[in-house]
Image: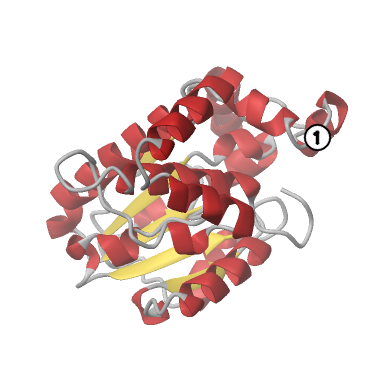
Amino acid sequence: MLQHQPSRTAEYMAMFRASEHAKGAGRRVFTDPLAVALLPGSLRLSAKLLAVRPVGDMLTRYIDRQWPGARTSGIARTRLIDDWIEESIGQAEQVVLLGAGFDTRAWRLAALDSVKVFEVDHPATAKVKRARLQAAGADLNRVIFVAVDFEIDDFEQRLRDAGFDSARRTIVVWEGVSQYLTGDAVCGVMPGRAGLRHAAGSSSPMFMRARSTAASRSMAQTRSSPRSTARANPGGSACCPTNCRTSCASAG
């Protein structure tokens, strides 16, 4: 992401969720009425067109041709994690969304009404998200925003400062984030090292990373050259499960 600007990938994911919501009842696999409100002007117009047939169908086909698998895999993992949360929430008292981006589960999943939800993300993304949600009339008290730069901040301390209680059962979601971090940052977040695992009877964390490397690269290259993309993720190993497993094991 660019300095002092919200995550562009968070906006793309909100766009993809908006495309699913636009299908209407009986066709969509989840609802997300706030997704459009989280988009910048240009994407917001496109998202509104998605609800107009046949224009919406043509726009969806165009997105899928430009970034094969990105939209459909994003929609699939959204529904999958929704289901996991709803199945596990009876055992939990807190939910932590690491790298929450423009996630809206705290507002659209009734299962989260009775638990504390902590959204952990970069200050620039969190600031824009709060402003756009407020403009849409969303209740910001449904979540506790925790501003963290995973590359430099101690996110566990930030969580504790925000009221996270390690004595309570917790669901941890880390969705589509690791591929945008350096290897060191990934290993600093992994629950094998973090105190989140030690939350009393903590539920198993839910990790999801993008499987469509080609799609992710295509989206990134629309905004930057290959050279600048490489500089943005100098670790390079964050997307490799084998390297990450080895690094995290050596770090304890």
Q: Which of the pair 239/35 is nearer the observer?
A: 35
Position of 64 with respect to 52 (left or right) is: right
Q: Which of the pair 186/133 is nearer the observer?
A: 133
The residue at the point 45 percent across, 53 percent down is 48
The answer to whether any part of residue 240 appears in the image is no
Q: Residues within 10 Å of mark 1 (few under 14, many from 20)?
A: few
Position of 141 with respect to 89 (left or right) is: right
The residue at the point 29 percent across, 58 percent down is 170
Q: Which of the pair 229/57 is nearer the observer?
A: 57
Q: Which of the pair 197/81 is nearer the observer?
A: 81
Q: Secondary structure at mark 1?
A: loop
Residue 106 placement: quadrant: bottom left
Q: Position of residue 161 (x, y in %)?
A: 52, 77
Residue 26 placement: quadrant: top left
The residue at the point 65 percent across, 24 percent down is 218
Disc 1 marks a residue whose amino acid type is Ser
Give the residue at mark 1: 224
